[in-house]
Amino acid sequence: MSADDQKRLAGEAAALRVEAGMTVGLGTGSTAAWFVRALAARNLPDLRCVPTSEATADLARELGLPLVTLEDVSRLDLTVDGADEIGPGLALIKGGGAALLREKLVWEASARCLVIADAAKVVPHLGAFPLPIEVVAFGHKTTGNRIADVLIDHDVPVPARVRTAERGQVRTDGGNLIYDARCGVIHDPARLADDLKLVTGVVEHGLFLDLADEAIIGTDAGVETLHP
């Protein structure tokens, strides 16, 4: 079974957790897209959906899901989203899709958060996937230097690099830049998360700690469920 097949299984299983009348956060990325498609296919009444990116909003509109913004709701019942890595205790690295700030805002406004992924995303420790760090564009090189100092303190000697694509620097939906830190192994995710948030110019980072209530993992044998 391919990774995409496993993502589809996880997304379809997560869609079954949604009930009529819920306010649901829609994640960003290839796995979350499978959930969005499966949720739309259920045609549940009285849903309200909060997308975490413009790309997800476009897909949801195309499929006929009713959208609201985070400003329209005081609390979400459930958010379903993917992850780039799932470590012990359901500690996550997210942000490969450059939507980490909006994702974290929606996650923190949700009563429950469900992460979905293919089997390869489950790892013994975080850090093999480059850690995304969202920064304001103004003075970002100075911010990058301060991020490098933090990384050195966490035994990461390689500075974080600005994420680029064919058209140049990657911009988030909010107009910010992404620095990717190749940590290898993150020995103390909680301390790194705290230290990065103290850097002026850092808007958010991709460490999602103590936020996921459950994980649905697609595997060759079917769907597995993980808890913190």
Image (spheres, grey):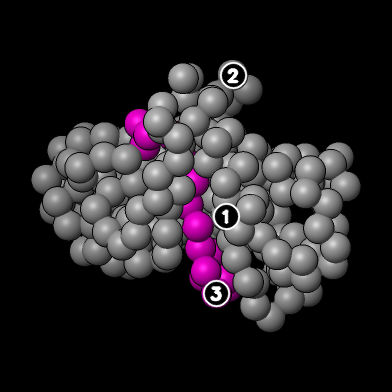
Q: Which residue was labeled with disc 2?
A: 166
Rounded to the nearest angstrom, the CA distance separating label 2 from label 3 is 38 Å
For this orientation, the residue located farthest to the front is 221
Residue stretch in magenta: 107-121
Q: Quadrant of residue 130?
A: top left
Query: In the visual, does 22 lie left or right of 211?
Result: right
Q: Position of residue 196 (x, y in %)?
A: 32, 59
Front residue of 61 and 138 = 61
Type of the residue with mark 1:
Val
For disc 1, the neighbor class at 10 Å (few under 14, some 14 to 19, many from 20) is many
- Which numbered disc flags the more N-terminal residue, 1 or 3? 1
Q: Nearer the viewer, residue 124 or 137?
A: 124
Q: Which-is-in-front pick, marks 2 and 3?
A: 3
Task: Work out how far the residue at label 1 is from the one at label 3, CA to CA, in angstroms.
Answer: 11 Å
Circle 2 packing at 10 Å, graded few (<14), some (14-19), many (20+), is: few
Circle 3 residue: 111
- Asked if residue 11 can be seen in this view, the reply is yes
Q: Residue at x 57, y 71 (%)?
A: 110
Query: Amino acid type of disc 3?
Result: Ala
Q: Kindly check if marks 1 and 3 are in contact, taking CB atoms under 8 A apart as contact.
A: no
Rendered position, 218 above or below 146: above
Say what secondary structure mark 3 lies in.
Answer: loop
Q: Where is mark 1, residue-wise?
A: 80
Instruction: Tell me how far mark 2 sits from mark 1, CA to CA.
Output: 30 Å
- In the rendered image, the residue lying farthest to the bottom is 74
